[in-house]
Structures are given as structure tokens and as C-alpha cells.
């Protein structure tokens, strides 16, 4: 699948989660960081968006740890900065 098609699909998945809170957290992370992602980081995020919203949000808030196959300290640290969530 071409790189741009993958990113379009990921953006849709990131912004259509089921709750507004998850949309802002998971979609906002995608919008803030995806432009600079490597192939490996895109592949990581493709797996992340298949996880439950509650789990992803727990990793971002620091109340839970990702499973070993998703434990990328650099990406989890970026999630935990929460500088990508627009505040009203």
C-alpha cells in the first residue's frame, strides 16, 4: 500500500474512535507527529490504533503501560507529553 494511502487510513482510524476524548487524544497525536514518522513508526501506529481506546489513553496518561510488543519509549514519551490535544 502506498505511503500516503496508509497515512490517510491511519488518520481516519485515529479520528474515528468512538468518543470525543479518544478522538482528540489519538487523532491529535497522529496530526502532531505523523508527518515525521519513519516506516517503522507508521507500522507501530497501525498496530496501536487496533488496540482499545481505554488502553491507549491509559498509556498516554501514564496510568497504564503498553504491552511489550508496543513498548517504544520514544513514541510513548511523545504520547505522554499531551502537547497535541487542542484545548478550548
Image: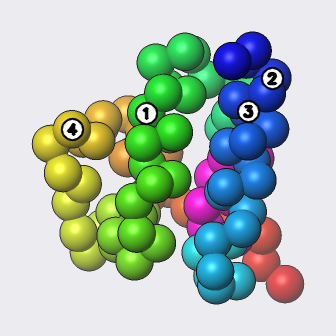
Q: What residue sits right under mark 4 in the picture? A: 69
Q: Residue at x 21, y 38 (%)?
A: 69
Question: Looking at the image, is mark 4 or mark 2 earlier in the sequence?
Answer: 2
- Tell me if residue 19 comes above or below residue 40 in the rendering: below
Residue contact at pointers 1 and 3, CB within 8 angstroms: no
Q: What residue sits right under mark 2 in the picture? A: 4
Residue 25 lies in quadrant = bottom right
Q: What residue sits right under mark 3 in the picture? A: 7
Residue 59 lies in quadrant = bottom left
Residue contact at pointers 4 and 1, CB within 8 angstroms: no
In the image, residue 50 lies in the stretch drawn in magenta: no
Majority SS type along the magenta span: helix
Front-lying residue, 32 or 11: 11
In the image, taking residue 42 as reference, residue 62 lies left or right, namely left
In the image, residue 26 lies in the stretch drawn in magenta: yes
In the image, taking residue 61 as reference, residue 7 lies left or right, namely right
Question: Looking at the image, is mark 1 or mark 2 earlier in the sequence?
Answer: 2
Front-lying residue, 22 or 18: 18
Find residue 75 and report its horizontal and vertical position in percent. 42, 39
- For the record, the magenta segment spans 24-31
The CA distance from mark 4 to mark 3 is 21 Å
Residue contact at pointers 2 and 3, CB within 8 angstroms: yes
Q: Residue at x 61, y 23 (%)?
A: 37
Question: Looking at the image, is mark 4 or mark 3 earlier in the sequence?
Answer: 3
The CA distance from mark 4 to mark 2 is 25 Å
In the image, taking residue 53 as reference, residue 20 lies left or right, namely right
Q: What residue sits right under mark 1 in the picture? A: 44
Disc 1 crowd rating (10 Å Cα; few below 14, some 14-19, many 20+) is some
Amino acid at each position: 500500500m502506498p505511503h500516503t494511502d496508509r497515512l490517510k487510513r491511519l488518520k481516519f482510524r485515529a479520528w474515528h474512535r468512538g468518543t470525543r476524548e479518544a478522538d482528540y487524544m489519538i487523532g491529535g497525536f497522529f496530526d502532531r507527529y505523523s508527518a515525521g514518522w519513519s516506516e517503522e513508526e507508521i507500522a507501530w501506529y497501525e498496530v496501536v490504533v487496533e488496540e482499545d481506546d481505554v488502553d491507549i489513553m491509559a498509556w498516554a496518561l501514564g496510568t497504564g503501560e503498553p504491552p511489550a510488543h508496543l513498548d517504544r519509549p520514544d513514541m510513548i514519551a511523545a504520547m505522554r507529553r499531551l502537547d497535541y490535544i487542542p484545548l478550548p
